[in-house]
Amino acid sequence: MRPVVVTVAITGSVARKADNPTVPITPAEQIESTRAAYEAGAALAHIHVREDDETPSHDPDRFARVQDGIRRHCPGMIVQFSSSGSEPDADLRGACLAHRPDMASLTTGSTNFAAGVYRNPAPLYTALAERMRANGVRPEIEVFDLSHLHNARRLIDAGLTDPRSHIQFVLGIADAMPADPHCLDILLAETRRLLPQATWGAFGIGRFQREAIRWALARGATGIRTGLEDNIRLSKTELADGNAALVRLAVQICAEYGARPATSDEARAMLHLN
């Protein structure tokens, strides 16, 4: 069975405990939820942090506390900080990079969301890429639109990131890229043309999470992603009882495609972190 990197996106910036009581908010909750997901098969943790009132935060100290806990309790697990946010401010969104996580997300362009525009102008994502390179942080390119692949190619050509970058396709956000296997095929074909050395994964939002995992596995993805950031339910009528429950479901789907969750060491080698 081939190894696949299972990412768990533990919190995000939207879901709250009123939506699902198991959404981890405090650093202690995030560490414990990540530990359970790691034991279920996740090799990479995608981290957002929140204030105690559940609002999104860019507090680098909170990122550091979560990272320290994961490194204590989840040996070898890849720590990936989010550099996203509603503010197009590289200093604010990139402050956490001083703590040198293994990876950080990098969105290489703006996109429409149902509630507004997720702003990532070129000066912002270029500044974040420069900060990641300076701190030895490997970017994961989060792709919401075809143009984001071309922008990533420009960063590579400028020497700001590695041609072996990891690409993550985001499917199913309202007013952005639809959750459609044909759209994934278009994105994947363009990736192979522009970024032939890149690794890749894909994930779906909400009810599309399970379908997107299947589409990615059927196309030989390097990795898949699950977690409460993207989906708070196991089914239409059942809330997920934590991140570990979603990871266990993803692992079951992997087995249907002749795949298994990569170990931390395997994941690091697959994503060129060694």
Image (spheres, grey):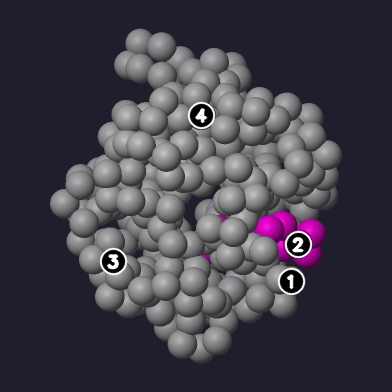
The magenta segment: 97-107
The numbered mark, 2 or 1, whose residue comes first in the sequence reads 2
* Label 2 to label 1: alpha-carbon separation: 6 Å
Front position in the image: 112 or 67: 67
Q: Secondary structure at mark 2?
A: loop
The residue labelled by disc 3 is 146
In the image, taking residue 229 as reference, residue 235 lies left or right, namely: left
- Mark 2 and mark 1 residues within 8 Å of each other at the beta carbon: yes
The numbered mark, 3 or 2, whose residue comes first in the sequence reads 2
Q: Secondary structure at mark 4?
A: helix
Identify the residue shown where x is 74% and y is 37%. Answer: 74
- Mark 3 and mark 2 residues within 8 Å of each other at the beta carbon: no
Residue 100 numbered mark, or none: 2
The residue labelled by disc 4 is 247
> Which residue is the extreme one toward the front?
1
Residue 135 numbered mark, or none: 1
- Location of residue 95 by image quarter: bottom right
Disc number lying in front (3 or 4):
4
Residue 17 in sight: no
